[in-house]
Amino acid sequence: MLFPGIALATIVALEFVGVPGVVALVGAVGLFVRGLALSSRRASFLPRAVGLAALLVVLLLLRPVEPGEIPDDLAEVLLRELLSNPDRERTCYVEVDGHDASPDLLRRLDDLGVRLLPRSRARLRSRDSEAVADLSFSNVEDRRTGEPGTILGVKNLRRENWFLFSLTVEMSSYTGMLHAWGQRCIVLRPFGWRITGVKSRWVS
């Protein structure tokens, strides 16, 4: 049972704190075990306390470097949330961190039955061309065909709290000036990304 337990603990540690975290955890556990050995011989709680404190500090403070870009596997989870009740008649133009979604990411979402294109294929209609009232609800069109659509975006992956492993990321949907909204998602990555909470940020 010892080896499976060690293997499972290593996998969990890699998911939550990465390779540097595993190295630090091994050192902290070593200090803790050493403290137990010393305390049993010297009847002193100080070595044990030092080892336990080192272990807690590593668990609470050592985390992976905050990612600068949203990986495709996380973007896929977020976009599936955005498209949970899709309008299959409307084309969606997708951007990730302000750039076109990758072709591979768009292929992963083929099973949703929604026409997905890169953000660069869309443009906002000129206010001079239509009444403002019309643009308020339908302001996005295809650059080539003029077909109306919706811009979907995910961006700003950052850490939620200094002492937790959860991260936040922003999602948005824009169809027109009065037909748009933004949300902040709390995400966690134990054995794959998952959304643990969604908070509305703005609606227009």
Image (cartoon, rainbow, N blue to C red):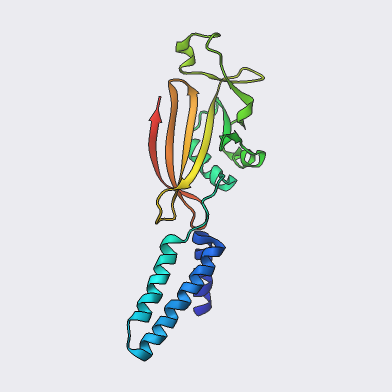
Q: Position of residue 117 (x, y in %)?
A: 62, 31
Displayed quadrant of residue 54? bottom left
Q: Position of residue 98 (x, y in %)?
A: 57, 34
Query: Disc count in the image?
Result: 0
Q: Is residue 84 visible?
A: no
Displayed quadrant of residue 199? top left
Task: Tell me if 2 is positioned left or right of 164 in this view.
Answer: right
197 in relation to 40, above or below: above
Q: Is residue 23 visible?
A: yes
Q: Name the residue nearer the viewer: 196 or 37.
A: 37
Q: Position of residue 63 (x, y in %)?
A: 48, 58
The quadrant of the picture occupied by the C terminus is: top left
Residue at coordinates 55% horizontally, 64% vertically from top-left? 20
Residue, far bottom: 41
Q: Position of residue 66 (x, y in %)?
A: 51, 51
Residue at coordinates 60% horizontally, 35% vertically from top-left? 99
Q: Name the residue nearer the viewer: 142 or 165.
A: 165
Residue at coordinates 61% horizontally, 42% vertically from top-left? 108
181 in relation to 109, above or below: above
Task: Tell me if 101 is positioned left or right of 43 in this view.
Answer: right
Residue at coordinates 47% horizontally, 11% vertically from top-left? 132
